[in-house]
Image (cartoon, rainbow, N blue to C red):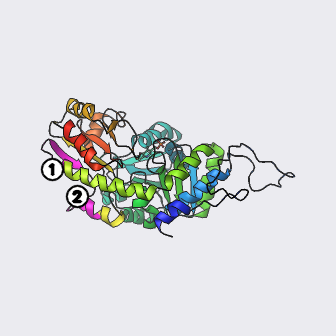
Amino acid sequence: MKFGTKAIHAGVEPDPSTGAIMTPIYQTTTFVQAAPGDHKGYEYARSKNPTREALQKSFAALENGKHGLAFASGMAAIDAVIKLLNPGDEVISTNDLYGGSYRIFTKIFEKYGIKFHFVNMTDLDEVKATVNANTKLIWAETPTNPMMRVMDLDGLSEIAKASNILFAVDNTFATPYLQNPLDHGADIVMHSVTKYLAGHSDVIMGALMLNDDELHQQLAFIQNSSGAVPGPQDAFLVLRGIKTLHLRMERHSENGRKIAEYLKSHPKVESVYWPGFEGTEQYEIARKQMKDFGGMLSFILKKDSQDAAFEVLKKLHYFSLAESLGGVESLAGHPASMTHASIPKEERLKSGLKDSLIRLSVGVEDVEDLIGDLEQAIV
Ligand SMILES: *Cc1c(COP(=O)(O)O)cnc(C)c1O
C-alpha cells in the first residue's frame, strides 16, 4: 500500500456493529464481561480502547512498523522510552535537542541515575567516541529544532547496532510522509503527534512506532502501568487528521521551499536554516533519507538582536506568534525567548541559536500571501 492510501485506510475498518465508516469514539472506561475473564478483548480503557487501537494501527502503518503506541503527549512517549533504562545506564543525544526533551532528560531522569551525553550528532566520530559499556540508548532528532540540522540515520544506526544499543529517533519535524527512520535501522520512532500528524492545532498527543515484539511488550507495559494514555476523542481527531497528512505535507514542503528561497535572497536576512539548499553535506544526507524538506525553517537577521526579531514578529499577520508547529496555519516563534529560553545563552549560542533567530512553521495557506506577509514585516 502506498503512503496516501495508508493514511486513509490503515487501521480503520467499518464499525462491526453498525457499519459506520468512521471509527466511533468509544467514550467508555470499562467493558462488560459475560463471566470473569470472558470478554471481547477489552476490559478497562487505560489498557485498551477500540478508538485508540485503530489509531495505533494507523501509526504503525505510517512508519512501516509492526506496532504503534499512543500516549497523552509527545513528552509522555519520550518518558516511556527512557523508563526502559536502569540506573547507571547512559544515553547519547544531540546538543541541538528539543527543549522539552533536554528538560526531561536532565531534570527528571538524571535524578534516577541515568546519564545523558549531548554531542554534536552530525559528527559520527564524536558519537562513536562517546559510546561506552554503559551506553544503552542513542536518542536522535532530525531535522533539529530550530537549527534544522540533519543527522545521518544510516550512520547512527550502524554505530548503535555495532554495540547493541537501542536507537530511537524523534521524527516529529520530518513526519512519516517525509522520512521513515525504521527503514534506516532505528528501533523506535517517536512523534509529537500534536504537530503534523494531528495537524490542526487542536490535540496534544504522542506516539511510538517500532518492529520488535519484545520491545513492544515492554513499552506497552509501561504505557499501561504509567498510564499516560490519550482519550478516545483525541484519538478520533488524530485519525481524522492523518487522512490528509500526505496532502498537507506536499503543500507544507512546497510552501517551505518557496519561502526558504525568498528569505535567502532577502537583503535584511543573514542566513536561512532549511535542509533543502543544494551543495552542502547536510543536503546530501537529507536527500538520502527524506522525500522532501517540509515546512519548518529558521532564519537570522543581519541586524542580530532580540529587538530586531521582535519588530518582525510584531508586524507579521498570517504567521501567528505562538509555540508549537505543524498545523495548517503558519506560525512564527522566537526560540531564544520562547521554546529554548530554558537553555542557557552560552549553550544556545554554541549551537548557533542567535537572538535574532526566528523559526517559521510554514502552513498550507497560499504562499503568495505568506511571502507578502514576510515582505511587509522584514523592513
Ligand atoms: C513538541 C515536540 C515534542 C513534545 O511533544 P508534546 O506533544 O508537546 O508533548 C517533542 N519533540 C519535538 C521535536 C517536538 O516538536
In the displayed structure, 357 sits above or below 280; it is above
Quadrant for the C terminus, please: top left
Looking at the picture, tell me which residue is in the foreground, 326 or 77: 326
Residue 283 within the segment the image draws in magenta: yes
* Image spot of residue 80 (x, y percent): 55, 48
In the displayed structure, 188 sits above or below 272; it is below
Quarter-wise, where is residue 312 in the image?
top left
Three-letter code for the amino acid on which mark 2 is drawn: Phe
Three-letter code for the amino acid on which mark 1 is drawn: Ser
Instruction: Determine if the C-beta at disc 1 is less than 8 A from ligand 1.
Output: no
* Image spot of residue 43 (x, y percent): 75, 49
* Image spot of residue 265 (x, y percent): 15, 50
Determine the secondary structure under disc 1.
Answer: loop
Rendering quadrant holding ligand 1: top left
Which residue does the numbered mark 2 point to in the structure image?
A: 277
Which residue does the numbered mark 1 point to in the structure image?
A: 265
Q: Residue furthest left?
A: 267
* Image spot of residue 157 (x, y percent): 42, 63
* Disc 2 packing (10 Å; few <14; some 14–19; many ≥20): some
Q: Is residue 357 left or right of residue 178?
A: left
Q: Is residue 97 left or right of residue 264?
A: right
Which residues are drawn in magenta?
263-284
- Could you tell which of marks 2 and 1 lies nearer the N-terminus? 1
